Image: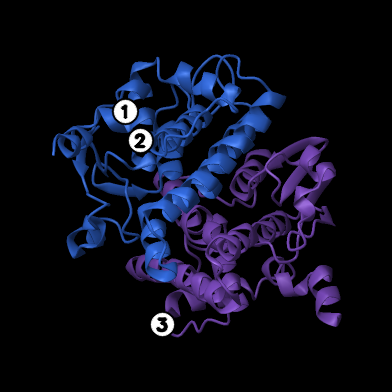
Chain colours: A blue, B purple
Amino acid sequence: MGIKIYGFWRSIASFRVRVALRLKGLPFEETPVDILSGEQFEPGYEAVNAERVVPTFIHDGHSIFQSMAIMEYLDDIQPEPRLLPEDVKERAYARSLALMTIADAHPLVTPRIRNHLAKTFGADVKAIEEWGKHWTTEGLATYERLLARRLPAPFALGEEPGLADICIAGQVVTAQYLKLELNTFPTVARLAGRCFEIPAFATSHPFEQPGFKTASAH
Amino acid sequence: MGIKIYGFWRSIASFRVRVALRLKGLPFEETPVDILSGEQFEPGYEAVNAERVVPTFIHDGHSIFQSMAIMEYLDDIQPEPRLLPEDVKERAYARSLALMTIADAHPLVTPRIRNHLAKTFGADVKAIEEWGKHWTTEGLATYERLLARRLPAPFALGEEPGLADICIAGQVVTAQYLKLELNTFPTVARLAGRCFEIPAFATSHPFEQPGFKTASAH
């Protein structure tokens, strides 16, 4: 197939794409772009991704950006195993769940936001961490309210893990970065626990990436 | 069909859904939820939308939230006229463009963020406006770079307006709120101009909603 991604160990959007590829059994190569040191703003990378974000997904020379667009594309080119259910109402529910972190909770805690808070409001490390905890907790609370109304059985949409589970698991990884307790979000915690028992999720976890291991060794 | 939405005149996500419904010729009723005064946090609305955001889309009693999930659902239940192209690579491009505002630019300028900046960092009206201008300009600049690489002909994906155009037009409405000049984003400005010549876009513009007219009359 010839799939290449530009990603970063800490990027939750890169995590989502990694899991999706592994659930589908599609081999890929990942090239790291260090978004903490600002490598995404270098001209060479802008030619790859005009938005200067990770991940970028390249399939036989064709580029796609935005993790949700990439995951939908994977379902379009190789429907089985499905990331999105076939039933239209179920598809809509899966997408709604996915977008709660993709469009609401996660955009608020990315490096560019943290840097801008420091620059604009003089936010220190502690204030930036509190900002991250606030919005990440909001996201977890929303998921808990929703999953309590329709319990995972055992995954968000049913028997098999898919788009919604990937995105919820990513929200839980953000909580891990911030050392947030999940006690008050038991349904979310159980779902994420179930996900990380699956090799596609476990091997895609940020702490399992070579970049994290190198960074931690210093 | 029995379509109802809970929306708000100023909500860009509500704008997107309104345009999508009108492009498809689907009649709907809209119930306003004043997100500036915090009506979305009242218990009655939480029963409708556990995420406490607008819009909520209700079709024959079934609820869907998140504007992107709603627009995809509309394409699933009534494919013509299409919001997303049929070709898988083109679909991915449309979704990538849509998500640049849905997942990156727009989440940063919503009322809950503005309120949290004031509460946490003591940001005043001017500082909050500057925050909004910064991220809205970033979003416009990204669109300009991308559209310059593949010029709209005349819409982002070709002959007909669709998902990407709706989202780009919404980003331009945010710029209008902030009175940003579009001179440096000529391709974006031309595309949005073309969109707002179409009745589905023009009648869905926030300034054309009854709530805006009532608010301005005071």
Residue in the picture at 53% in, 81% down: B180
**Mark 3 crowd level (few <14, some 14–19, many ≥20, 10 Å Cα):** few
Q: Would you say residue B151 is visible in this rendering?
A: no
Q: Nearer the viewer, mark 3 or mark 2?
A: 2
Residue A160: give x, y in percent of width and height. Answer: 51, 17
CB atoms of marks 1 and 2 within 8 Å: yes
Identify the chain of the residue marked 3, using the numbered disc in the image. Answer: B
Residue indicated by mark 3? B184
Compared across the picture, whether B136 is left or right of A196 comes to right
**Mark 1, chain letter?**
A
Local crowd size for mark 1, using a 10 Å CA cut-off: few (<14), some (14–19), many (≥20)? many
- The disc placed on residue B188 is none
For the residues carrying marks 3 and 1, which lies nearer the camera in this image? 1
Give the distance between the C-alpha atoms of the residues marked 3 and 1, in whole angstroms. 40 Å
Question: Residue A199, percent across and down?
Answer: 33, 17
Dot 1: what SS? loop
Q: At label 1, which amino acid type do we have?
A: Ser
Q: Which of the 4 image quarters holds residue A183? A: top right
The quarter of the picture where residue B214 lies is bottom right
Identify residue for label 1: A204
Q: Secondary structure at mark 3?
A: loop
Residue A115 on image: x %, y %:
36, 61
Q: Left or right of A179: which side holds B36?
A: right
Q: Secondary structure at mark 2?
A: helix
Image position, residue A45 (x, y; %):
22, 57
